[in-house]
Image (cartoon, rainbow, N blue to C red):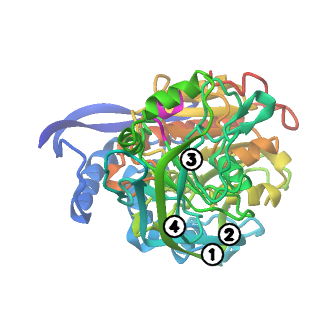
Amino acid sequence: MLVHVARGVDLVSVSLREFAYPRIIRPKVLLFPAHKSRAGTSRISLALFLIGLCLTSTSFGQALQGTPHREEFFQIPRIMEDILTLSSPQFQGRQAGTPGGEQAANFVAQRFHALGLHSPSATDKGENPNQWKQQSSVTATQVLGPAHLAFFPIGLSTMHSPLLAIPGKDFLPIFDSPSVNLTAPVIFVGYGIVDPARGVHDYQGVDVRNRVVMALRGKPPTYGPWITQEEKTQTARDHGAAGFITLTGPILNRYESRKGLGQTPMAIYAADPEDRPIPGVWLDGKLGEDLFQSIGLSLQRMQMARNEQQATGPQTLPLIAHLQWTSQSVPGTLTNVLGVLPGQDTGGQDALIIVGAHRDHFGEQAGLPFPGADDNASGTAVMLELARVLSQRHSPLKHTIVFASFDGEEQGLLGSTLYVNNPAFPLERTRAMINLDHVGVGNGKLTVGVTRLKKAVIQQAAKDAGLAKQVEVFGYFPGGDHVPFFEAGVPTITIVSSGVHPHFHQPSDTSNTIQPEILETTSRFLLSLISLVADHPQPAGHPEPTAKDLSPG
């Protein structure tokens, strides 16, 4: 055990934008574990107790107007409790279209009801939690355990034993894969990109029909456009491949390095919901290196050649791959949950701000539970706590706030797309869409992507919250529930916690990996941002994004 000195605080009203900031008054000695425990619920409960003891006094309390009232303070133990609940086995990984996903939707709807929020269609407080739901149909696919992947070297002078891969550790099936029992030769196709206009054709000169193609994740640094796994899967299918394998090579790109993604397999869907998928797996990159070495090849050299645009085409490997599992696809319901906090202007034409966070995760796949604590029980819980704080203010905000708990983000931004195509309020009235996604783990800083708003607004909100050094401002992020809003012309602000997310899309994304101090930083910044954006002058309509919006700086 390490002894940490926690300090008691008083909340003191400060004139700057009428926020309350803490003043240290006396030290208290508390005991905290020196490491993040991976133990069970009893250890988590103890941690919550200690966090509550410390953060009930030290948690950042902010009031948007006048002297703060106790109920207007963010309470980090409440956020932690909601993360623990949403990532518990009760919600079965919150996959869209499954009973666990619907339970999570009911959890949020009941909270909105309890807080007295309005439903989008109601003039008075809704009495039925179903009034807050925006729904559509969705197909839920589950890979039933166990899943099998094996490689058999062929045609070598030396005998090699088959390589039997372990689900979760060595590979993960792509979760929208159909049932498969496939044994076929493997063809390596570089990054798996076909773009003749830019001189890229990773399938040139090879017939991959009834073969398993293996492709590196991402794209070479010399290739400009963004490329998705969905597009690569479509390319493999169009060329007649029977299955595909993706892996992260040993040469990481800047994004992979910054996020600490490494070469571990991650949970993904790889096909458009309207397309017929082909079976696929994400293979651990280090295992892939060993596999190449066992057949006398170097994955690093092959990746380097493609990164440097050396003339290297597809290559048939002396390998047979065997993929086998059973998938189950069932019709389900996609459910967004919307809660409205009316602003001072009740004439129906007031501007509004959307605060959104996706609620869904991957469910239970290949016999593995995916709790999704950081991604994105953390964003959901921060949003719920913001709703509580703002709903208990003595006077309403100037602008209406719409709290949106989106479903189906992991399957291709289905919930946010549903909202944009069927908005509860005209999109022209939406001053900004603020998206919260995996805000519970990292290096203590926040990464904020902003479009159609001046970055100075974000920097000012950070300064007002005392977080000028903790908030890093960038331009457009290409993934997340803000994207459909951006494409519809709405100004967007995306908040994620900076640094390494080592459990991203992993079964290990559990509640005991969450860092409460990051939740506090997120909460402080978010409330400052809400106040500033609500008061910030905005031209009529939505401006077009500038080149600066789309740049990372």
Task: Name the residue tied to disc 3.
Answer: 187
Q: Viewer-nearest of labels 4 and 3?
A: 3
Say which label, 3 or 1, has the lower sequence index.
1
Badge 2 marks a residue whose secondary structure is helix
Q: Amino acid at mark 2?
A: Trp
Give the vertical position of 397 relative to 525 (above or below).
Answer: below
Q: Residue at x 78, y 54 (%)?
A: 420
Q: Are marks 1 and 2 in contact (CB under 8 Å)?
A: yes
Which label was assigned to residue 129? 1
Q: Amino acid at mark 1?
A: Pro
Q: Viewer-nearest of labels 3 and 1?
A: 3
The magenta segment: 248-257
Q: Residue at x 49, y 52 (%)?
A: 282
Say which label, 2 or 4, has the lower sequence index.
4
Task: Name the residue tied to disc 4.
Answer: 94
Q: Is residue 530 left or right of residue 23?
A: right
Badge 3 marks a residue whose secondary structure is strand
| Residue 322 at x, y percent in the picture | 47, 62
Q: Viewer-nearest of labels 2 and 4?
A: 4
Which label was assigned to residue 132? 2
